[in-house]
Amino acid sequence: MKIKTLFIACLAGLCVATTVSADIQSRQIRFGYGLNENSNQGRATKLFAEEVGRLSDGKLRIRPFGGATLGSDVQMQQALLGGAQEMMVGSTATLVGIVPEMAIWDTPFLFNSAEEADVILDGPVGQQVMDKLEEKGLIGLVYWENGFRNLTNSRRPVETLEDLDGIRLRVMQNNVFLDSFKTLGANAVPMAFSELFTALETRTVDGQENPYNTILSSKFYEVQEYLTVTNHVYSPWIVLVSQRFWDRLSQVERDILLEAAITARDFERQDTREEAARALSELQEKGMKVNELGSDEVERMRAQLTDVNQSIAEAVGMDLWNSLQQALAEARAGNSMSSN
Ligand code: KDG
């Protein structure tokens, strides 16, 4: 355990050790998330809980609540703001109502790869956006990976954009997703993730869009026949702490939560990418009919969404938008990633 060892190494004598562990109080920490336990979100939360327990000698106990048992992402965010819950992981997209700058991560086709997303999210731009949470009563620790989103529906394969016409498509409670899919011709319906499976099953909506991992772990293949590969946006998750709870923590306790969140992040990204690599064939084995949207149609999609990009730039502020474009250009120049 690095934190305690450091102190023990720095200063001789037992009294120092006791002082440090005195900085760690016995606490129960309710940690909510929306996907089920056997998901990339659930596995990373389990590892986070183990790491916090290890680093605090069992004094800080993370109690995971999966499957939206503590409510939808929006409901849990409100619980953190009110201090009724200590932590959660969830989408950045549903945070736009609290921090408009989070919409920058909803920009269609922003990242060319997950590795590119890591560079930006873990860099100054990612931190700048995360820091905006503090003035609103939330503490952002790290970004985890939800992944590249793809379309599913129960009506027909989407070979051209016109195939989206009239499809009742569930989107996250977020104006960028709403505008994007309305612009593309779908009948976009904002809805909490916790209501989605039932809405697909009862045909209240025809389709939705999420990464392969979530389509698999949430068993959407049971209620969706067609999967269209679009990779139309990379979605991050964010690990949040209630500021009211954070203010009661010692620096040692805060360091433990951050260190554990970073360890869990690195595990989560690798776990998510390994699962995503095998998920498409598993979904086909489970009966989904898969097609890849042709590059011409993807180009049409990009072209039709330029106005959405402009509205995002205005919503988050041109300074932030330009620093993001600058950071992307540097990242691509740095390791010769192809330009967007
Ligand atoms: O609670 C689940 C969400 O955190 C996340 O998976 C959201 O991608 C999401 C969606 O489609 O709502």
Image (cartoon, rainbow, N blue to C red):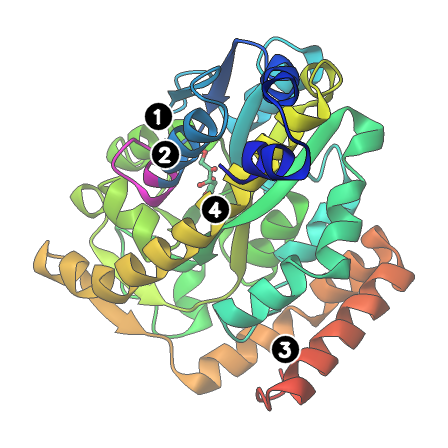
Q: Quadrant of the C terminus?
A: bottom right
Residue under label 2: 35
Distance Cα–Cα, label 3 vs label 4? 39 Å
Residue under label 1: 67
Q: Secondary structure at mark 4?
A: helix
Residue under label 3: 303
Distance Cα–Cα, label 2 vs label 4? 20 Å
User: Going from the N terminus, do you reach mark 3 or mark 4 first?
Assistant: 4
Q: Secondary structure at mark 2?
A: loop
Distance Cα–Cα, label 1 vs label 2? 5 Å
Distance Cα–Cα, label 2 vs label 3? 33 Å
In the rendered view, tell whether residue 132 sits above or below residue 125: above
User: Going from the N terminus, do you reach mark 2 or mark 3 first?
Assistant: 2
Q: Position of residue 185 (x, y in %)?
A: 53, 60
| Depth check, front residue: 254 or 122 | 254
Judge the density around disc 3: few (<14), some (14-19), many (≥20) Cα neighbours within 10 Å: few
Say if the magenta span includes residue 193.
no
Label 4 is placed on what type of residue?
A: Thr
Label 3 is placed on what type of residue?
A: Ala
**Where does the magenta region start and end?**
35-43
Instruction: Residue at 43% x, 25% y: name it.
Output: 53
Judge the density around disc 2: few (<14), some (14-19), many (≥20) Cα neighbours within 10 Å: many
User: Going from the N terminus, do you reach mark 1 or mark 2 first?
Assistant: 2
Within the image, what quadrant is residue 264 found in?
Answer: top left
Instruction: Residue at 27% x, 57% y: name it.
Output: 275
In the rendered view, tell whether residue 296 sits above or below residue 3: below
92 left or right, relative to 324 = left
Q: Is mark 2 within 8 Å of ligand 1?
A: yes
Q: Nearer the viewer, mark 1 or mark 4?
A: 4
